[in-house]
Amino acid sequence: MLSWLLNIVGIVFIGVILDVVLPDGKTNQFIKHVFSVFMLFVVVSPVSNWVSSAFNVEVSSGVTDSNFLYVTNLEKINALEKDIVSEIESGGISNVSVIINGNVFEEVLTINSVYVDVSNAVSENNLTKSEVKDFVLDKILINVDVVKEDIVFYG
């Protein structure tokens, strides 16, 4: 409320300065009209806030929505990556890196591809590289809605 009042006082102060500084004529009239519309918006701005809170109307911008979607979906992807890695480690394989690539700006998170680095993988059960890849592939297909062709292995 205080900032709104300060805005009004500032606008009135600028209006007085413009009235004194500008010469008479059509330019002065034009600037006064533009300035009065601007002042009207400043004065009416708390009314829109009051209406949205009184009627429980949510006013949001696309930027906030996309930021929220980005953060939420990124957290989902990070949680999925951690879950997959922990399942792989519980199977006796360590040093496997999983990176999930998805569209984080969609309302429904879609996974495009999964990148898996098994170059430094260590198996407690002395599995071969192909057995490690098969095990990791199974864990990914169980946890992520993606086709086998969209999973890329390195190493």
Image (tube, rainbow, N blue to C red):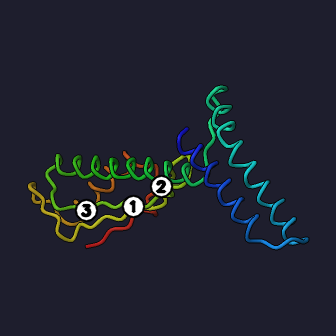
The residue to which callout 1 is attached is 114
Label 2 and label 1: CA atoms lie apart by 8 Å
Residue at which label 3 appears: 97
Identity of the residue drawn at 86% across and 72% down: 27
Instruction: State the residue at coordinates (68%, 48%).
Output: 42
What distance separates the C-alpha of mark 3 from that of mark 2?
A: 17 Å
The residue where tag 2 is placed is 111
**Marks 3 and 1, Cα distance to the nearest angstrom?**
10 Å
Q: Residues within 10 Å of mark 2 (few under 14, many from 20)?
A: some
Q: Is residue 135 left or right of residue 62?
A: left
Which type of secondary structure does the marked residue at label 3 adopt?
A: strand
Position of 2 relative to 104 (above/below): above
Determine the secondary structure under disc 1. Answer: strand
Q: Quadrant of the N terminus?
A: top right
The amino acid sitting under disc 1 is: Val
Q: Is residue 90 left or right of residue 84?
A: left
Please tell me how crowded label 1 is: few (under 14), some (14-19), or many (20+) other residues with Cα within 10 Å: many
What residue appears at the point 12 percent right and 59 percent down from the top-left corner? 123
Going by the numbered disc 3, the residue's amino acid type is Ser
In the rendering, at what x and y percent does residue 116 appear?
Answer: 31, 64
Pick the residue in front: 21 or 96. 21
In x, y percent, where is residue 58?
62, 36
